[in-house]
Image (cartoon, grey):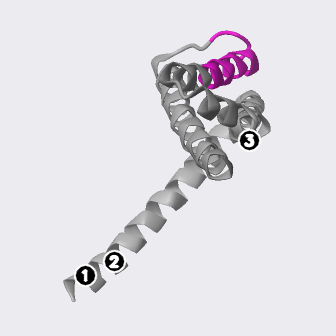
């Protein structure tokens, strides 16, 4: 009973918070239309970067099998470091070379960490596929 009531009340509270956020955001961008263009530019750059991060290890699908053949942890670490460096360089290029503010740096570092984990997972999958074909 308390679980059902909690879900019901929680749903209503969450809906109220979301409606208030949408109204406040709409009002803010109504009063500051120049900020809306900045938001769209940031969103566009973020989506391009996420697409780059997602496509990079798949586009270089031939590298993990070479690392598997080398049978070297240093080669694997170098490959992953190279992918991460390319991700970071792309992010800075899309951002215009400069990141300002603690929040922006925090989000960038979080994005870099997530990109590193994604690269590791994809390369691990590709390496397993290469080992099965050897």
Give the answer, above or below, for where 94 lies relative to 110. above
Can residue 46 be seen here? The reply is: no
| Residue 44 drawn in magenta | no
Contact flag, marks 2 and 1 (Cβ < 8 Å): yes
The answer to which of marks 3 and 2 sits earlier in the sequence is 2
Between 46 and 84, the residue placed more toward the observer is 84
Determine the residue positioned at 61% across, 42% down.
Answer: 127
Distance from disc 3 to disc 1, alpha carbons, whole Å, reads: 44 Å
Circle 1: element type: helix
The answer to which of marks 3 and 1 sits earlier in the sequence is 1
Residue 87's disc is none
Circle 2: element type: helix
Residue density around tag 1, few if under 14, some if 14–19, many if 20 or more, within 10 Å: few
Circle 3 sits on which residue? 58
Farthest residue, direction bottom: 1
Circle 2 sits on which residue? 7
Residue density around tag 3, few if under 14, some if 14–19, many if 20 or more, within 10 Å: some
Tell me which segment is drawn in magenta: 82-98
Circle 3: element type: helix
Q: Nearer the viewer, mark 3 or mark 1?
A: 3
Residue 3's disc is 1
Give how far across and how far down residue 93 sits, in percent: 74, 16
55 sits to left or right of 73: right
Give how far across and how far down residue 4 sits, in percent: 29, 85
């Amino acid at each position: 009973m308390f679980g059902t009531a909690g879900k019901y009340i929680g749903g209503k509270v969450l809906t109220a918070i979301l409606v208030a956020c949408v109204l406040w955001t709409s009002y803010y961008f109504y009063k500051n239309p120049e900020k809306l263009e900045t938001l769209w530019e940031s969103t566009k750059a973020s989506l391009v970067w996420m697409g780059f991060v997602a496509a990079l290890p798949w586009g270089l699908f031939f590298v993990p099998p070479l690392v598997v053949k080398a049978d070297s942890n240093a080669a694997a670490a170098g490959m992953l470091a190279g992918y991460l460096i390319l991700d970071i360089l792309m992010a800075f290029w899309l951002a215009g070379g400069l990141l300002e503010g603690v929040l922006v740096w925090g989000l960038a570092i979080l994005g870099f960490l997530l990109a590193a984990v994604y690269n590791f997972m994809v390369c691990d999958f590709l390496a397993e596929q290469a080992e099965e074909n050897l």
